[in-house]
Amino acid sequence: GGDPIVVNGTEAAVYFFDLASIREHVNRVSAEITVANDYNIQTAMIYTKDVGGGHDTTGKVKMFYDATYWKTMAQSEGNVKDKSNITTIDLDFGLQVASIMYGMDMDFNYLGFKVTGEFVTNSSHYMYPDELPGTGNPTDIVSAQTARTGHKYSERDNAYYITAQKDWKKFGFTGELFKMGKFYRPYLDYFYTSAGDLSYGVYNINSRNNTVRFPLIEDNDDDDMYPDTMVEQRTFGYRLLSSEDPDGVFPGNDEDNDGVADNN
């Protein structure tokens, strides 16, 4: 009962559920919400070293409350304002355990008229980290570990593009049509509990909030020999910052393409 919560502009309504007091094995966590108009629903999970849970009133360091990245679970089509799209949504929680991409591409050239295109499907798979709540971070995989029984679910979405091009001596034309689905996630987010262990030296790995993102599609805007985003920058380097560009050249800072930044 009660009046619905109204969120406008850049406002957000955040619901926090503390499971630390549950003393039974949990295999699945889900939430049911009813929404309408222009909405974007995101979820995240917080893992705390404070097994008692509860609200922190002492100002503990961030490492006590590492959270997964926010993940869009539902989004309205367009800016609806008349509540005509009211719906009830079931949201599942879990860690990404697999990301699969498959597709096809085409390349056509007839008398200089060129058409290229690609269609890709991404299937992301998730599993809830079953165990007793209030026992700290999920454990890493160990030898002879009992099979996990957490609830599994998956999402699937597509992306595509098609381009057409024709050139003559003095002029030409080109056009592109593309779309990327809202749940198209060409990456694998690996929740890496050891990433916060300074003695282990894994801070060289590009990890934030105990999450290592493995991109399945690589950009190279500065056109060097390294992808713009790497799990470990400059593979043969040692103890470099994860935010560092491998050769020190950022997009737009090397207009003469000599491999040396224009501004030091």
Image: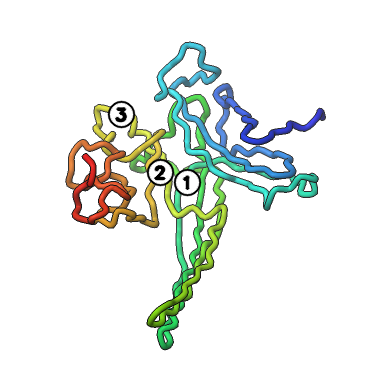
Q: Earlier in the sequence, mark 1 or mark 2?
A: 1
Regarding mark 1 in the picture, which secondary structure is present there? strand
Q: Position of residue 211 (x, y in %)?
A: 40, 39
Whether the residues at callouts 1 and 2 have beta carbons within 8 Å, the answer is yes
Whether the residues at callouts 3 and 1 have beta carbons within 8 Å, the answer is no
Residue 197, numbered circle: 3
Horizontal relation, residue 176 to residue 203: left or right? right
Residue 227, numbered circle: none
Neighbours of disc 3 within 10 Å: few (<14), some (14-19), many (20+)? few
Residue at image position (47%, 46%) is 96
Q: Position of residue 54 (x, y in %)?
A: 55, 18
Q: Position of residue 159 (x, y in %)?
A: 52, 62
Q: Amino acid at mark 1?
A: Gln
Residue at image position (80%, 45%) is 82
Whether the residues at callouts 2 and 3 have beta carbons within 8 Å, the answer is no
Q: Amino acid at mark 3?
A: Asp
- Screen quadrant of the N terminus: top right
Residue at the spot of label 1: 96
User: How far is the residue under mark 3 from the one under mark 1?
Assistant: 22 Å
Residue at the spot of label 2: 190
